[in-house]
Each structure stands twice: as C-alpha cells, then as structure tokens.
Amino acid sequence: MLVKDVMGCSVRSVKPDTRLIEVVSLMCLYRYSGLPVVDDDNKLIGFVAEKDVLSRMFPSLNELMDGGMATVDMDELMGKYKDVVKLRVSDIMTKGAIAVSPEMHVLRAAAAMARNKFRRIPVAVDKRLVGMISMGDVHKAIFSSSVTQAVTGCIPE
C-alpha cells in the first residue's frame, strides 16, 4: 500500500509571510497541530507547528539556569502569547521540512514520522506539496485492509 492510496489531498498550507494570528486561529478552529509552509510555486519550504508557537513563550535555558523554574511566573509566560501571535510564520517555522513521496510504502512513511516524532508529514513531488499523511491515515488503512481480508477469508486462521 502506497502513500498516495491513503494521503489527504485537500491540504491547508500557509505562506512564510502569513501572520501567526491567522495560523493559530486555523490551528484552534480546525484542530490542526501543524501546517506546511509553501512558497508562491507551492514548493514546500517549511512547517509550522503548535510546538513552534508555544515554545516561544517558554524561558530560555539561560533564564532557567539563572533563576530556576521556581522563579518563573507561569501567568506572565502566558501573557507572552499576544506578542508571539504578532509574528509571521517565517519567524518561527521549521525550515526545510521533511516530506515523503506519494510512491513510498505507507509503513516507510510511518517509520519516518515515528523517527522524527511527527503525527503527520507532508507529501511532495519535486518539492511541491501534493498532500499530507498522518499516523491515523496509516493506521486506518492497515485496519481497513486487515478487516477486509478477515471478512473475505483471505487471512489464514
């Protein structure tokens, strides 16, 4: 079973100059954990994830070493959110996003996601975004295939 057999083709993406307030609105409204970042030619140039947004609120390692976690005001950190959402995608995105090919076996794509601790990964052809595949897509496809085989008697008992 190949990635192209199970990937989602209707993919929401953003541009590097998109304001983060727009991105986090999409994340919260549609429950996206991340979005691919593309240029004007739909070439995949990065990825912006919830962790990229939220990690901008955390103190730096130096700040933690100077004062320790006990001195960190969590409510003050939450207040930084309004400053973070004023940024652009290019300010926080992970550049050079990893992608898989539509011709790749779904288990290889799942392995790439597991290795990189991703829940979903862009699908690209010649660096152009053509879809997304998630661990859930892989799991559903394997489950569906297994159940179909079991019902039709193709799996030996």
Image (cartoon, rainbow, N blue to C red):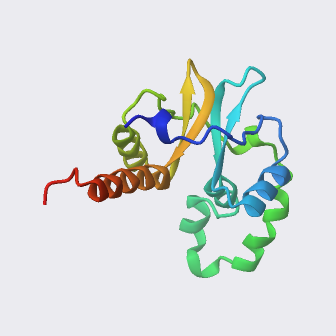
| Residue found farthest to the left | 157
Residues 43 and 45: in front is 43
Toward the viewer: 128 or 86? Answer: 128
Q: Residue 136 at what x, y percent from top left? A: 48, 56
Where does residue 38 sit, x and y in percent of width and height? 71, 30
Q: Residue at x 61, y 57 (%)?
A: 51
- Looking at the picture, how far across and down is residue 28, in whole percent? 75, 63
Give residue 156's position: percent from left, percent from top. Answer: 14, 55
Quadrant where the image shows the N terminus: top left
Evaluate whether residue 84 shows in this view.
Answer: no
Of 141 and 43, the residue lying toward us? 141
The quadrant the C terminus occupies is bottom left
Q: Foreground residue, 105 or 156?
A: 156
The answer to whether residue 71 is seen in the rendering is yes
Up-down: is 114 above or below 47? below
User: In the drawing, does residue 63 fall left or right of residue 22?
Assistant: left
Q: Residue at x 65, y 76 (%)?
A: 72
Q: Residue at x 57, y 76 (%)?
A: 69
Q: Quadrant of residue 108?
A: top left
Q: Residue furthest bottom?
A: 70
Total numbered labels placed on residues in the image: 0
25 horizontally vs 12: left or right: right
The residue depicted at 22 percent of the width and 50 percent of the height is 154
In the image, residue 152 above or below residue 106? below
